[in-house]
Image (cartoon, helix red, strand yellow):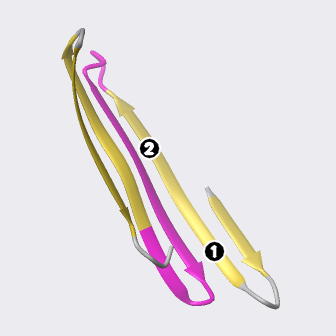
Amino acid sequence: MGTDVSHPDIDSTVNAIDAHYFSADQRWALDGQFMHSDVDGVTGSGFLGDINYSPRQGIQHIIKATYIDDTI
C-alpha cells in the first residue's frame, strides 16, 4: 500500500508491505508488515510480525515482534 500527499502545508509519503505465509501442512504461519514514512523530510519505519507453529491440534507456539520508531 502506498499513499502520497503533496500540499502547500505538508508533503507526506507512506508505504507498507503486508506478507503472509502458510506451510503446506498448515503447521507454520508467518505474518509480517513493514512500514516506512517520509513527512517533510523526516523519515520513520516500523515492523509488525509473528510466527505461529502448531505441531498438533490443541498445541500452539507464537512469537510476536513489534518495532515502531517515534517518527513514523
Location of residue 70 with respect to 23 vertically, above or below: below
Residue ID at (70%, 71%): 4
Q: Tell me the element at label 1.
A: strand
The first of marks 2 and 1 along the sequence is 1
Q: CA distance from mark 2 to mark 1?
A: 20 Å
Q: Main secondary structure of the magenta part?
A: strand
Q: Residue at x 44, y 44 (%)?
A: 19
**Residue 55, percent across and down?**
17, 17
Residue type at mark 2? Ala
Check residue 40 for magenta coloring. yes
Q: Which mark is residue 37?
A: none
Residue 59's spot in the image, x, y percent?
20, 16
On screen, residue 66 above or below 10: above
Q: Quadrant of the N terminus?
A: bottom right
Q: Which residue is mark 2?
A: 19
Q: Position of residue 35 (x, y in %)?
A: 48, 63
Q: Which one is in front, 71 or 34?
A: 71
What is the residue that sits farthest to the right in this orientation? 8
The image shows a total of numbered marks equal to: 2
Q: Residue at x 60, y 69 (%)?
A: 14
What is the three-letter code of the residue carrying label 1?
A: Thr
Whether residue 33 appears in magenta in the rendering, the answer is: yes
Q: Tell me the number on the disc at residue 13.
A: 1
Say which quarter of the image contains residue 8. bottom right
> Tags 2 and 1 in contact by the CB under 8 Å rule?
no
Number of residues whose C-alpha sits closer than 10 Å to that of mark 2, classed few (under 14), some (14–19) or many (20 or more): few
Magenta stretch, residue numbers:
23-45
- Direction from residue 44 to residue 3 in the image, left or right: right
Q: Is residue 72 above or below residue 16?
A: below
In the rendered image, the residue lying farthest to the top is 57
Decide: few, some or many residues near mark 1? Use Cα within 10 Å; few <14, some 14-19, many ≥20. Answer: some
